[in-house]
Amino acid sequence: MTSENTIDWEPDDPSSDEDVLDLSHLPEATNSATIRLNLGDEKAAMIVYNSLRVDKEPKRSKAIRELTVNGQFLVANITCVDPKYLQKSIANLFEMCHLAKSTIDLVGAYQYKPPAEKNEQPAKKKNKK
């Protein structure tokens, strides 16, 4: 930790373009978590990011969630005064990421098969005796 109101985010890491997170707007006893999820590729990370960024935290949770994409990673910074709400916010994030990623995988595996033309007769099944 570099000072009371900032957290050092591994400044020697060249993949990080954010070195310091400003926490001056939050109360003294703040709980936080930084989560970096590997979603396989940048396209999937952007789809999940765009799906989750519109889903705001409930007002009663008082958690602040900031999402960014760093290559194939979705990075979430979650801060909250109450550790129980932080835990719930993290669980919700994982659940929503899993749902979005499962949908991406399901849609990505789908292969369109055009219907057979009307003139073509389906192959007749042979009865085995």
Image: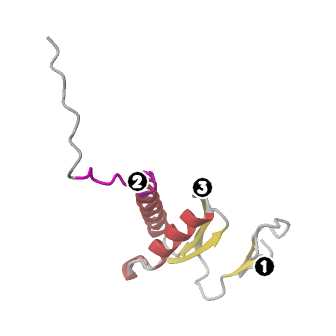
Q: Residue furthest top?
A: 129
Q: CA distance from mark 3 to mark 1?
A: 35 Å
- Mark 3, secondary structure of its residue: loop
- Mark 2, secondary structure of its residue: helix
Task: Provide the residue designation for mark 3.
Answer: 40
Residue 18 in the figure: left or right of residue 112: right
Residue 106, label in figure: 2
Residue 59 image position (x, y, % from top left): 39, 82
- Whichever of labels 3 and 2 marks the residue nearer the N terminus, that label is 3
Task: Provide the residue designation for mark 1.
Answer: 3
- Check if residue 114 falls in the magenta segment: yes
Residue 27 image position (x, y, % from top left): 58, 83
Disc 2: CA contacts within 10 A as few (<14), some (14-19) or many (>=20): few
The residue nearer to you, when weighing 44 against 57, is 44
Q: CA distance from mark 3 to mark 2?
A: 14 Å
Q: Are marks 2 and 1 in contact (CB under 8 Å)?
A: no
Residue 115 image position (x, y, % from top left): 27, 53
Instruction: Specify start and end residues of the magenta stretch as a single range.
Output: 105-117
Residue, x 44% and y 69% (percent of image)?
85
Residue 30, label in figure: none
Amino acid under disc 2: Leu
- Look at the image and tell me in which quarter the N terminus lies: bottom right
